Image (cartoon, rainbow, N blue to C red):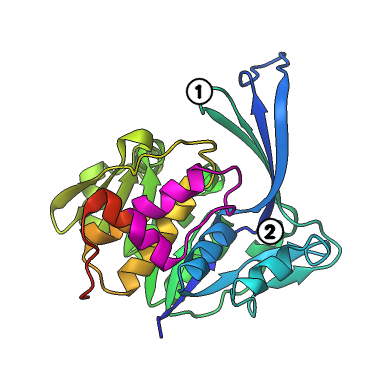
Amino acid sequence: MDRVISVVGHAAIDLLFDVENIAIHNESQPIIDYHEYYGGGAANIAIGIARLGGNCQLISAVGGDFAASGYEAELENHGVDLSLLYRFKSEKSTRAFVFTDREHHQSTYFDWGASKHLQELEPPAVDFVHLATSDSTYNAGIAKKAGFVSFDPGQDLVTYSKENLESILENTNMLFTNKHEIQRVCDMTGKCFEDILAMIETVIVTYDAEGSIIHNGGEAISIPVVTVKALDPTGAGDAYRAGFLLAYIRNYPIEICGKIGSTVASFAVQSIGCQTDLPTWDVMKARYEQNFGKFPESI
């Protein structure tokens, strides 16, 4: 059986809006359409791993409306371990309001809801943890206790103190960022990119349609995107991480991990909603082979 991947962060209700343009100050823009889906970075990754057949645990704070929303049953139906879910009955569950324009630019507003209580809690000791967008104090605490730490600060970087960010990075084995976030990490810590590479064994930077680059052991490995007809970019990064992390704990070479991540991400973008069309392992393998050749069976 696979090692358990514990994923820390939000389980959110996503309200996804299609708009003509992202509104600027003192301006309104028409909404073309909107949809409500299950989301939140940590839950997206947990369900992605579970769909692929991995062993996954979600560590998150949820409100009294979580069970009634159907989200709890959805996670359980996918086999996600919810034994470390924190429940705050008097709070609302986390919600994200995501506005996407015709050019796939996004603007996001986030209601933390019950997640704001994470900073008050004592994190557990876990074996292999992925820190998704979450409270920085909680993430810093669990990073000190975990055997292996994968870290994705995401858009929550703006909420991190320099102290918490540096504490997490000191305990991080694998860092996921996009091209904007890695610059922000450097700016907040006063370190250059080479300093980050010297600190952390594996650094993965995503570049939207240009794919991703894995920095590992002095190498920079380019991973292309798997091209599909994209309907919604929301959740692509989470799907990439789900595929990458499961491949990693199954001991696939780092380049194969990236290609598996890219393949899983291609399913997320071809449907509206972060979890709508995530693949099983066999379905992922078929698309992998269409794009990268024979899937490596020996690990």
Most distant residue in the bottom direction: 1
Q: Percent x, y for residue 191?
A: 29, 44
Going 83% across and 64% down the picture, which residue do you hit? 68
Q: Nearer the viewer, mark 1 or mark 2?
A: 1
Going 83% across and 61% down the picture, which residue do you hit? 65
**Kind of residue at badge 1:** Glu
Residue 114 higher or lower than 210, as above or below: below
The crowd level at tag 1 (other Cα within 10 Å; few <14, some 14-19, many 20+) is few
Q: Percent x, y for residue 244?
A: 36, 60
**Nearer-the-camera pick, 230 or 123:** 230
**Nearer-the-camera pick, 223 or 139:** 223
**Nearer-the-camera pick, 156 or 220:** 220
User: Dot 2: what SS?
Assistant: helix
**Kind of residue at badge 2:** Ser
- In-image side of 279 versus 226 (left or right): right
Residue 236 higher or lower than 53, as above or below: above
Q: Percent x, y for residue 81?
A: 60, 77
**Nearer-the-camera pick, 36 or 155:** 36
**Residues drawn in magenta:** 262-287
Of mark 1 and mark 2, the one earlier in the sequence is: 1
Q: Percent x, y for residue 108?
A: 62, 36
- In-image side of 282 versus 6 (left or right): left
Most distant residue in the left direction: 218
- Disc 1 marks which residue? 103
Q: Quadrant of residue 228?
A: top left
User: Dot 1: what SS?
Assistant: loop
